[in-house]
């Protein structure tokens, strides 16, 4: 019986092998629909899920998530994509000069935050802040992205997941009326948010 069970487990792992290089990162940067959609474009990203993080409220919901930011949980293959690459793409898809919200979404829920789990992630985030300061040619103190120790991530309601794909018209209308891309292009330049920028 034990031998039979071992064979079943081995077969299951062969069909669906565990990715030992899978890592997770939590990022907040305004509307989680947009951040989810933008980060999924990078090769090596396994999945991006919308949710809430940063606060103390248990079981937050879209209607009640006081203290939390709208955030995304990025699952990525560290053998294919590096943390600095992901964070750079994150910066290129937010307004790092705005610590009071993002684009048309205002308030604490929409502040940009990088949640780090250890000193390595914190160091990478700090380096990204310096790079953003240099690229935008603004003083370091103007970069308003908060660095915060990683806490629990609460998955958002199902209707928020993959919203850009499931509700394309609504998503495009929201993104346009919010002025997200117009502001990003002004900050970073046209086409500056491409994922093929790592060797610049």
Image: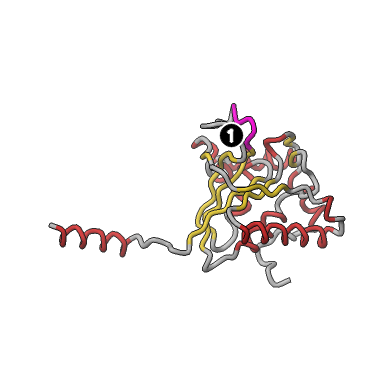
Could you say which is closer to the camera, residue 64 or residue 166? 64
User: Quick check: is 65 in the magenta stretch?
Assistant: yes
Could you say which is closer to the camera, residue 127 or residue 85? 127
Which secondary structure is most common in the magenta stretch?
Answer: loop
**Category of crowding for the residue at label 1, using alpha-carbon neighbours closer than 10 angstroms: few (below 14), some (14–19), many (at least 20):** few
Q: In which quarter of the image is residue 121?
A: bottom right
Mark 1 secondary-structure assignment:
loop
Q: Residue 20, position in %: x, y?
A: 43, 63
Could you say which is closer to the camera, residue 14 or residue 41? 14
Residue drawn at point x = 59 percent, y = 27 percent:
64
Point out the stretch of residues depicted in magenta: 64-68
Image: 173 above or below 188: above
Q: Which residue lies furthest to the bottom in this view?
A: 199
Residue drawn at point x = 19 percent, y = 57 percent:
5
Q: Residue 30, position in %: x, y?
A: 68, 42
Say which residue label 1 marks: 56
């Amino acid at each position: 019986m034990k031998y039979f069970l071992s064979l079943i487990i081995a077969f299951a792992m062969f069909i669906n092998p565990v990715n030992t290089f899978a890592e997770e990162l939590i990022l907040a940067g305004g509307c989680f629909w947009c951040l989810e959609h933008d980060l999924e474009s990078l090769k090596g990203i396994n999945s991006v899920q919308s949710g809430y993080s940063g606060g103390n409220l248990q079981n937050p919901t879209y209607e009640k998530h006081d203290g939390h930011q709208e955030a995304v949980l990025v699952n990525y293959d560290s053998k294919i994509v590096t943390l600095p690459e992901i964070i750079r793409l994150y910066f290129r898809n937010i307004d790092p000069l705005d610590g009071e919200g993002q684009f048309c979404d205002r308030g604490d829920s929409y502040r940009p935050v990088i949640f780090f789990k250890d000193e390595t992630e914190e160091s990478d985030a700090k380096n990204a802040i310096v790079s953003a300061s240099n690229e935008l040619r603004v003083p370091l103190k103007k970069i308003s992205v908060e660095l915060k120790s990683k806490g629990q991530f609460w998955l958002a309601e199902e209707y928020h997941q993959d919203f850009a794909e499931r509700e394309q018209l609504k998503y495009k209308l929201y993104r346009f009326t919010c002025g997200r891309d117009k502001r990003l292009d002004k900050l970073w330049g046209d086409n500056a948010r491409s994922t093929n920028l790592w060797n610049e």
